[in-house]
Image (cartoon, rainbow, N blue to C red):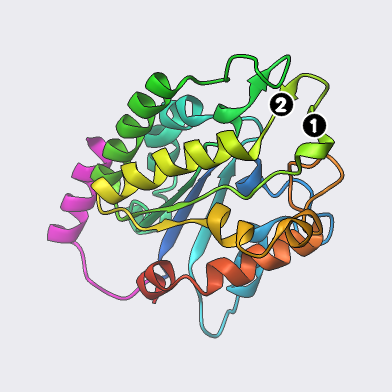
Amino acid sequence: MAALADRAAYSSGQSKTAHPKKVVIMGDSLIYGYGDTEGGGWVERLRRQWIDPSQPGPIVYNLGVRGDGVQQVATRLEGEFKLRGELRRRVPDILVLSVGLNDCARLGRPTGRPMTDEITFTRELSGLLEQAKQLCPTFFVGMVPVNETSMPYADVLHFSNIDQAHYNQMIRHACEARQIPYLDLYQQWCSQGQAWCHERLCDDGLHPNVLGYRTLVADISGWQPLMQTLV
């Protein structure tokens, strides 16, 4: 791929002077930060923490798009990645993906067809992960549980924890098969209990609220596979 060639050319012909690592974070509304009226989401909160002129931290690009599913993220992956090569012509050092929630929504009713069926989801996810691995070290942040009592979302989309658990398992297995570190937020949050989860979601039952995004910052800041790579 072109971006991979750019990385090889840079490594062979340029100085290895230390530079702030560039982190591209792509996905859906969990990346975009919808629902966080205070801090703009977990990506923006971390970006602000890492802005220090005396000791520059990672350069973060928030490429979250509300409503995106795995097919949409796969379609825009390499183009978005290559456009973030402006710093000394270096392509990004780290890619973080977070997608899947919109794919497991059911249309019209709780038993309606899923937005992305299992076969299509598995195929598209496999392609996305294979493509990502060719670009740079890749990490995957999972989805958080929903509040089913608030469904349907936007009067048409039905999300359920049963479907989420199933799609979460497919993502986890796909990442494990490719040795891509996976932060299983779904299981991590569910282990705290339903009331704990609902307290961290907006009234729409789908997006984290301010407390939810504060929790996500703590979850991701404590995720050693990613944090150790950023050093």
Q: Residue furthest bottom?
A: 54
**Residue 57 seen anywhere in this rendered image of the structure:** yes
Q: Amino acid at mark 1?
A: Met
**Residue 16 versus residue 132 in the image, above or below:** below
Is 10 inside the magenta-drawn segment?
A: yes
Nearest the viewer among 223 and 79 is 223
Cβ atoms under marks 1 and 2 closer than 8 Å: yes
Q: State which quarter of the image contains the C terminus.
A: bottom left
Residues under labels 1 and 2: Cα distance?
6 Å
Q: Residue at x 81, y 59 (%)?
A: 199
Q: Amino acid at mark 2?
A: His
Image x and y of residue 152, in percent: 79, 27
> Principal SS element in the magenta part?
helix
In front here: 65 or 214? 214
**Residue wearing tag 2:** 158
Label placed on residue 151: 1
- Mark 2 is surrounded, within 10 Å at the Cα level, by few (under 14), some (14 to 19) or many (20 or more) other residues, namely many
Mark 1 vs 2, N-terminal side = 1
- Tell me the magenta residue range: 1-19
Whole-percent x, y for residue 54 in the image: 55, 85
